[in-house]
Image (cartoon, helix red, strand yellow):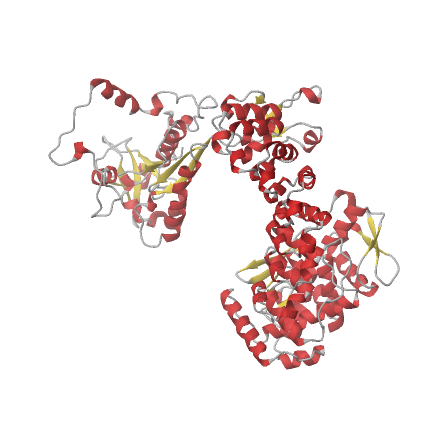
Amino acid sequence: FGSRRSLGGGLCLPHQLSTAAMSGGVYNVFQAYHFTPQELDVPEELSGQTLKLKPSDGEVVELDAEAACASDRLKQLACANGVDAELQVPVKKATLTKLIEYMVYHKDTPPAEVKTPLVADVMADCGVSKWDANFIKVDRETLFELMYAAGTFGIQSLTFLCCIQAAYMTKGKTGDKLRKDFNLTNDLPGEEEERITNAYWDIGSRKRYPPEDNGVDAVAAVLHGIQAAAEKNGGLVHGAAEEPQAASINLRSWRSNAWRAMVMEDWQQLFNVPDEVRDDRELMFTAVEQSKGYALSLASDKLKEDKQLVLRAVHHNGDNFEAAADSLKSDRAFVLEALLAGDGTALKGASESLRGDRDLILSAASKGKGGAMKGATESLQSNEKFVLDAIARDAVAYKYASESLQGNKAFAVAAAKINGLVVQYMSGAFRADHDVAAAAMSHTPQAAPLLHAARRSDLKGVDMSGGEPATGGKKDWPIYMGVPLTADAARDGLVYVTAQAQKYIVFTALSTITPNMGQANYIAANAFMDKLPFYSRPEKDTVGIMWGTVGGMGMRFKAFGSQDFMNMTPDNLLSIDDCCKILHVVCTQQDTPEWFAANFFDEGTRNAMLSPTAGMIQGEAAAVPRALLPGKEAAPTPPKEQKEQAEKKSSPFEKESAAGPLGGWPQVVRSALVEREPVLSKPGDGIYVGAAVVLTGIKNAMNGATGKLLQIYPEGKCRVALSNGKGNALLRPENLQVVMA
């Protein structure tokens, strides 16, 4: 089972709802749950086939395999066992027949989209189709059997439909009424009832949804109904490989069901529950899922010996194995199973003797769980030969070697020679080292994208052209940068690798320095972006552009258009051409500052931004160059240095950029900088505020001048800011041509 879903009546959905079903998806949007239909995902081997399903109490029933793909569990079983196998299903024939009716109908008719909270007391008014509304009109016992079956089989759309019906069934009923309807014993002490009620409302306020007045009572009643249905069909199932398990609690106990409901809402309620609640196996499976395995530490001693529960916790995080029973920690076969269930790091919680078991660790590494090295004893983590043996099986073992080995270049070279992929776990210095790079590439050419950017320029044996695969025997095929052109090429053995970009341009904004009211989120995001170059260098040549105000495009233009007050000062706006030039400078230069401020400044602002004390709070002691102190004249610059400074200030457009690691950075916008005749509209056509315009049809020196359209008056005249600096002009639309390209 899983956490409560507010459908307007307060109820609980089976935890399988969190897994993706092919007939649709359930999405949580601000605590409102939406079911959205999706197309069935039918594997090729199931297309046009028929499945044989054997219920727990009857003869084999056949089902169209494509319709069965609405069920995650049936699809997995069919793909694993083949369409000719007889699939055992943990439900009775009557329930299975009802499920088949639902899946067959929805094979070609997707369920309707349904949103919550429910807006009406009639399903059809909430988006449920007429067929589904009639299908779910069943008695209470049948409803919960369908809910149990839908959760067990992973049919999300049916689970959602059952929950809607359960919401209607329990809405507005008091705890006494629900206990009477479900024949439950009220054994909940008054003190515990008060604790549960207070905690329930506290959770609702924290999760920002209004709890229903009978919310915890309704959830407890629904939980009982599902559990009773599970018992009737042999018990609950956790995972495709497990046999049904009988309930570990008293189903008639209102106390047990109420505490269950609370833990379904928030697994951390386990810190406050009575001891017997920690012994509820079904509840602990849910809590383990919700807590990413941590809840195992809060389970009863008996459940800490439950292998399936422990494996589920370890699957989320290997560190959770420390909470398992000592008997499991010293069971060699089970410890290996736990290592394989997660990332291998569970060994840290095993017994001391198993942490020093070489064969156990190497066996795990051979199966892709080199993380077992994390739990190895210190002597093994420092044993060079042993660690190399583990790295040969799985490169991740290097990550958990001793610090002395990880800082040893000779060891790094030796590790790279036997498994080139190990470089991804090395320090930046080793990834940039010639010897380490050569060793890695000699063993594993696919390690190219994992190396430091400084080394990828002189790699040998890697075709950077990305051309078509060579013909001939597979042994002669080179490594290509990119992705497989076709699935057939990948299956035929062609090897492709991807390479990281060599140059990163981060777009941020000057608002980080000069914000205005209402830009808090924007400033926070830009401040984060401003630091990316610092943390990316030197491995990646990263630079940030702190854009100023750009006219004629972007969010401001879309939001305000001609009403944007920035249009009143057009000389302060960057044009798209200006932005192209800035990008060209940034993309074609190396060893740039971490970020540029890109904007037009008046002289006063520019001097303030470039002053040695820019950004300092008044009162701080500023380190100002001696030459800039009052009364001190700057020393004359020697002629040689003057020449060097002049060369540095030369425009990047006058010559090609210096050669980079791959032969020079791409001249990404050079074509945009070539002078050409503009493309103009017809006089008076397509004019808009902010447009670049050319004056035409004027019998004076202004004819042919350029400018920017600032305002269009009601009587039709247009005010244009002239580019030649001679102020504004008031013209008729027929005297303007818009620069289109």
Q: Residue at x 75, y 49 (%)?
A: 76
In front of the other: 495 or 446: 446
In front of the other: 231 or 530: 231
Q: Is residue 176 visible?
A: yes
Left or right position of 174 against 653: right
How many circles with numbers are drawn on the protein?
Answer: 0
For the view shown, which residue lies furthest in the right direction?
59
Q: Is residue 481 visible?
A: no
**Quadrant of image for the C terminus:** top left
Decide: is 223 above or below 432: below
Q: Residue at x 25, y 37 (%)?
A: 610
**Quadrant of image for the N terminus:** bottom right
The picture quadrant where one finds residue 656 is top left
Left or right position of 276 against 645: right
For the view shown, which residue lies furthest in the left direction?
631
In front of the other: 282 or 138: 282
Question: Can you give x and y, in whole percent of width and height, for residue 104 in the image?
Answer: 77, 56
Question: Can you give x and y, in whole percent of width and height, for residue 49 in the image?
Answer: 82, 47
Question: Can you give x and y, in whole percent of width and height, for residue 701 in the image?
Answer: 23, 30
The picture quadrant where one finds residue 680 is top left
Decide: is 326 above or below 300: above
Question: Can you give x and y, in whole percent of width and height, for residue 575 in the image?
Answer: 35, 37
